[in-house]
Amino acid sequence: MNKVLVTGATGFIGNRLIQFLLKENFPIIATSSDAAKAETFDWFNQVTYIPFDLKETSNDINLYEYFNRPDIVFHLAWQGLPNYKNDFHIKQNLPLHYSFLENLIHNGLKDVTITGTCFEYGMQEGSLTETMDANPANAYAIAKNELRKKLVLLQDKIPFSLKWLRLFYMYGDGKNSNSLIAQLNAAIERGDQNFNMSGGEQLRDFLPVEKVVEYIAKSGLQKHVEGIINISSNKPVTVKQFVLDYLASKHQSISLHLGYYPYSDIEPMNFWGDNNKLKSIIHDE
C-alpha cells in the first residue's frame, strides 16, 4: 500500500482528505505548521504527524527522508487565503512552495498532486478546458500558475508524475466564514429577515467539499492521467439559483437582498469547468 504525505493537513480540504484516505486504509503522514491544532483532529492518533513550517526548507534537510520517504504527496498547503490580491503570494509563497517541492522531488519523490485554482484561467468566460492557456489576473492565481510552470520545467530534469488539480467552487461545514454559504448559514442562525448578496446572475461551478475531496483523492492515486485536471461539475448554475436550491435543501427561507454587493472584479461573470478529463478518472456519468 502506497505511503501518502498530506500537507496542509489541518485545512478545510486536508482534514477531510485524511479522513477519506484513512477509510481506504492508506498509511498517512500528515504535516502542517500547527501541531497543537493538528492534535484536536480525530485522525491525529491514526497517522504519522510530522510538524513542519515551509520557511524551514533548506538544502541542508532531505525532506524526502524527513517525511519517511512517501510514495505519493498531496500538496494542499498554501498560506494567506482568501486574500487573493496580495503580492505575498508571488514574493513569499511561490519561492517557498517551489523550494519545498523541489527538495522532495530532488531527493526521491516520484508522484505529486497539487491543488491549483480555477482563477488560473483568469477572466476567460464559458466552459474552461485544461488545454486553454492560463491567463491569471490576481496574485494568488499568478503564483499558483508560476509554481505549476516551474514544476513542469523541473520534469525535464527529474522524471516525476505531476497532477495539477484546478479547484472551482466548493461548499461545506467549516468553510471560511466569509464564504457564501457560511454567511448564509450565519444569517439563518441569527434569524435575519434578509440576506445581502450580489446580483446573483453570475454563472459558477459548485461542488460539495465531500465530492471535491473524493475527486482529489482519486485523481492523485491513479496513474494514467497527469497534468492539469479540472475538479469541477461542468454544471453551471447562477449564484442566485444555487442559494435558492441550498435554502430549499435545508428547508429554510430568507429574503435575498440582491445587488447589495458589487460583482467581483477578479472573476468573469460566467464560467465553469469542463470535467471530461476528471470523468475519465472517476468514470462518473
Image (tube, rainbow, N blue to C red):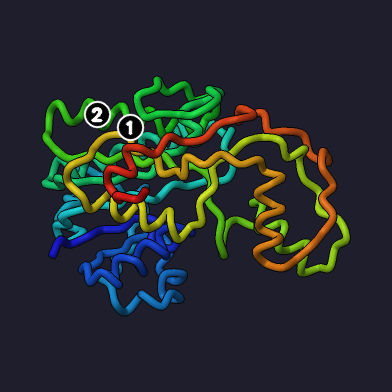
Q: CA distance from mark 1 to mark 2?
A: 6 Å
- On screen, residue 4 above or below 219: below
Image location of residue 283, percent across then percent down: 29, 49
Q: In the rendered image, which quarter contains the N terminus?
A: bottom left
Residue type, numbered disc 1: Arg
Q: Residues within 10 Å of mark 1 (few under 14, many from 20)?
A: many
Secondary structure, mark 2, is helix
- On screen, residue 176 above or below 250: above
Q: Are marks 1 and 2 in contact (CB under 8 Å)?
A: yes
- On screen, residue 282 above or below 85: below
Q: Between residues 1 and 36, which one lies in front from this camera angle?
A: 1
Q: Between residues 40 and 126, which one lies in front from this camera angle?
A: 126
Rendered residue at 49%/42% (across/down): 168
Q: Residues within 10 Å of mark 2 (few under 14, many from 20)?
A: some
Image location of residue 232, percent across then percent down: 45, 43
Name the residue beneath numbered marker 2. 152
Q: Is residue 209 visible?
A: yes
Rendered residue at 33%/44% (across/down): 279
Image location of residue 43, percent across then percent down: 36, 75
Tag of residue 148: 1
Rendered residue at 65%/49% (across/down): 242
